[in-house]
Amino acid sequence: MGSASNRSYESSSRSSISGMSNISSNNHDAVTERNMEFIWWLANRLTSYDEDMHKEILEDFFTDDAKYVHPALTVEGRYNIRKVFRVWTSLNKDEPEVTNIVYDGHTAIISLIQNLRPRVFPMLHLQVPATTTLHFRDSPKGLMIYSHQDSWTLEGIVQSMPLLGWWYDHVVRNVLGAVLTSAGGFLHTANRTTGYLQFRAEEVQKMSTEIIEKSSAEIQQRSKEMTTKAQLMVDQAKDTVEKRVASAREEVEKMRQLIRPVGPGASKAITSNDVEA
């Protein structure tokens, strides 16, 4: 990248990015093509193990406070990113390969293959699928990268190891698939059984409510009938008592009339005797 042609290409790419907002919709396809060309150019140089090239990319396209996020670490600032890059390239021998890029104008998602070949064990070579996400923001110089995130999936790491990858694909996945399938069937049956039991419980509750309501209505009706009968019996007893009291009074009155004397003196004596008696 240190050549004049690369700098010229960089300048033209930078100009194409900074002038994006001034281009009309009629040449949108051309702008998209130039943007993708620029992103591919940037990605290939960003993943290059050429330290001078990587340094110029950082100085020209990264903000001063840019952050680099890796599954194992996080650093901030262009200088610190350069140091991490230097350590990585000194430990690993082969550059990564860019396989695909998706770019929407402010975010680029770069799919790549990391070639892990330690310099101390060059015979060991693992290819791990990875993803690099670049976030851009506007600046007076044009779009600048303020965040660089590398993502390595556990699946990619496992599959990159020959024996472990075969075991993961043919054993772990099949076993987990069978377990989850069985669990899914069990949960389906359990859900159906639970739903049926809940339905039956609602039916039982409904029947119980109907029986209670019916029994309550019958009890109330019986209570009213018994109250009516009791009131009738009380009324009849009251009438009988009143009739007997009236009859007794009539008999007492008749007896008084029979034993009442004609003369005043006799009346007084009899009355005295009656009192003494």
Image: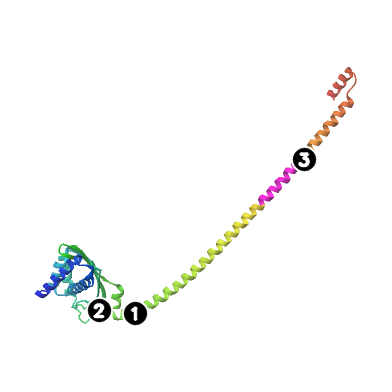
Residue 136 x %, y %: 21, 65
Nearer to the camera, 49 or 53: 53
Residue at image position (67%, 53%) is 218
- How far is disc 3 from disc 1 in space, using C-alphas? 100 Å
Determine whether 233 is above or below 146 in the image: above
- Mark 2 or 3, closer to the camera: 3
- How far is disc 2 from disc 3 in space, using C-alphas? 111 Å
Determine whether 218 is above or below 180 in the image: above
Q: Please report whichever mark, 1 or 2, sits nearer to the chain's N-terminal start.
A: 2
Residue at image position (57%, 62%) is 203
- How far is disc 1 from disc 2 in space, using C-alphas? 16 Å
Residue that numbered label 1 is attached to:
167
Q: Which residue type does callout 2 highlight?
A: Leu
Residue 138 is labelled as none
- Mark 3 or 1, closer to the camera: 3
Q: Please report whichever mark, 3 or 1, sits nearer to the chain's N-terminal start.
A: 1
Q: Is residue 168 magenta?
A: no
Q: Is residue 37 left or right of residue 246?
A: left
Determine whether 81 is above or below 129 in the image: above
Residue 99 x %, y %: 24, 77
Residue that numbered label 3 is attached to:
237
